[in-house]
Amino acid sequence: MTQENATTALPRAIGPGSAAEVTDISPHGLWLLAGGEELFLAFDAFPWFRHVRGAAARRVEEPGPGHFRWPDLDVDLTRDSILHPARQPLVSGQGAGAVHEPGT
């Protein structure tokens, strides 16, 4: 895996689907299947998932098209923020004003 692939969400078309599902968790990130594509969430860009395994990481909801929620982790992401994490800072509710800038 190249450095770019390790920090960038890569969509991969795989056919129609209606429910969001975490299909795999690797040492570098997790794979989310939704809307007929598979998205990669690199731990470098989405650090909240780095140390989470099992049901908490796999329990994802899609309350609206392109809006993903991990209720056990209190994490909400949009398809756009997954595809382009550098466009917007990711804000964490852990600690007052905690902000994670991808790549830092």
Image (cartoon, grey):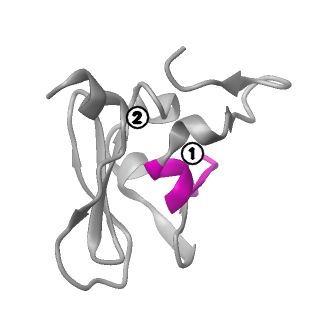
Kind of residue sitting beneath label 1: Leu
Q: Residue, x 28% and y 77% (percent of image)?
A: 36
CB atoms of marks 2 and 1 within 8 Å: yes
Residue with the mark numbered 1: 73
Is 31 situated left or right of 9 in this image? left
- Report which residue position mark 2 lands on: 52
Q: In the image, is residue 7 above or below residue 103?
A: below
Quarter of the image for the C terminus: give it: top right
Asked if the magenta segment contains residue 10, the reply would be: no
Helix, strand or loop at mark 1: loop
Mark 2 residue crowding within 10 angstroms, few (<14) / some (14–19) / many (20+): few
Q: Of helix, strand and loop, which one carries label 2?
A: loop
* Part of the protein shown in magenta: 70-83
Q: Identify the residue shown where x is 49% and y is 19%.
A: 103
- Quadrant in the picture for residue 21: bottom left
Tell me where residue 37 appears, x and y as whole percent. 28, 68
Query: Which of pointers 2 and 1 lies earlier in the amino acid sequence?
Result: 2
Please name whichever residue, 49 or 17, is drawn nearer the observer in this view of the structure. 17
